[in-house]
Amino acid sequence: MAEISEREQLIFEVAQTEWDMFQHVYNTGGRASCQDDPDTFFKMRMSQWMVYSDEVLHSYLEDCAKALEEGRNLMFEKYGRMMESTFPEEYEEIREYLPDVKDKLEIVEKIVGINLEWDTQMLHDYPNLRNRGRVHTTAQDSIMAGSSMESYLRGELLSYSVHTLELICQETVTAYEKGESLLKQTIANETLFYGYTSLEEAEEKHAAS
C-alpha cells in the first residue's frame, strides 16, 4: 500500500474538516442527499484543494478552527449565501446570521472574474464534460437550475478570511498570467478520481453518453 504524503494528508484533513461542518448544515426541506454521500464530497473537495499551495491549505484550516471557536459553520455560511438568488425568501430569514463581508467583496470579485473566464474556456473546450456541472453565471440561477458556478464560488470565497483570500487571489492571478487555469486543473483532478486518464478521455466518454 502506497504511503500517504504529508501534503496528501493535509488535503484530506481540509476535506474532512469541511465534511464535519457539512454534517451540521440543516436544510429546511430536510437532510440533503449529498450529506450522505461522503465519496462524492471528498472527491470534489479534494480535487479543488489539490490546486492550491500548502500555505493556502494551512490558512484555511486556521479559518475553520477560528470559526468553530466562534460557533460559526463555514459550510452554513457558504450555502446560506448561495440561497440569495435561488431561495430569496429563505435567505432573508438567515441573512442576520451571516457575518459582514464588505471587506472581502473586492478581492472575491477579482477571483470570481478570473474563474468565469476559465469556465467560459472550459465550456468551449470540453462542452460535454462541463455541461454536466452547474450552470455558468448567477443570472442563470433558479430553483430548478440551482446555484451556478459563479454563485457557488462567490458564496464559498466569502466564507474565507481575508488572509486566505489574499493567498488564493495571488495564486489565481499568477496562474492566469501564465495562461494556466486552476479551474481546469480542478476538473482534471476530478476526472482522475473517477478513473479517467485525462480530460480528453472524459470529454469523449460523455459525448457518447
Image: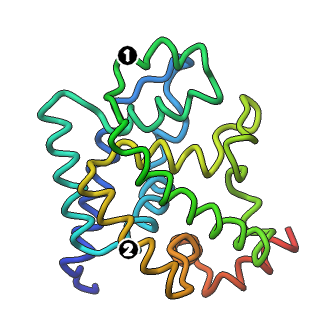
Task: Of the two numbered discs 2 and 1 on the same chain, state the one appearing first in sequence.
Answer: 1
Secondary structure at numbered mark 1: helix
Which quadrant would the C terminus be assigned to in this image? bottom right
Q: Position of residue 1 (x, y in %)?
A: 28, 85
Picture quarter containing residue 71?
top left
Instruction: Please rate how many residues cluster around mark 1, counting C-alpha atoms within 10 Å: few if below 14, some from 14 to 19, many from 20.
Output: few
Residue 187 at least partly seen: yes
Height in image: 208 above or below 94? Answer: below
Regarding residue 22, the answer to whether it shows in the image is: no
**Res. 29 image quadrant:** top right
Looking at the rendered structure, the kind of residue marked 1 is Glu
Quadrant of the image occupied by residue 197: bottom right
The secondary element bearing badge 2 is classed as helix
Residue closest to the eye, 53 or 133 = 53
Residue 109, position as x, y percentages in the image: 50, 52
Amino acid type at mark 2: Glu
Q: Toward the viewer: 3 or 141?
A: 141
Q: Is residue 126 left or right of residue 76?
A: right
Residue named by callout 2: 171
* Real-space Cα separation, disc 2 to disc 1, in angstroms: 32 Å
The disc at residue 96 is 1
x then y, percent, for residue 208: 87, 73
Please tell me which residue is depicted at 43% across the width and 17% down the height of the picture.
94
Label 2 crowd (10 A; few <14 / some 14-19 / many >=20):
some
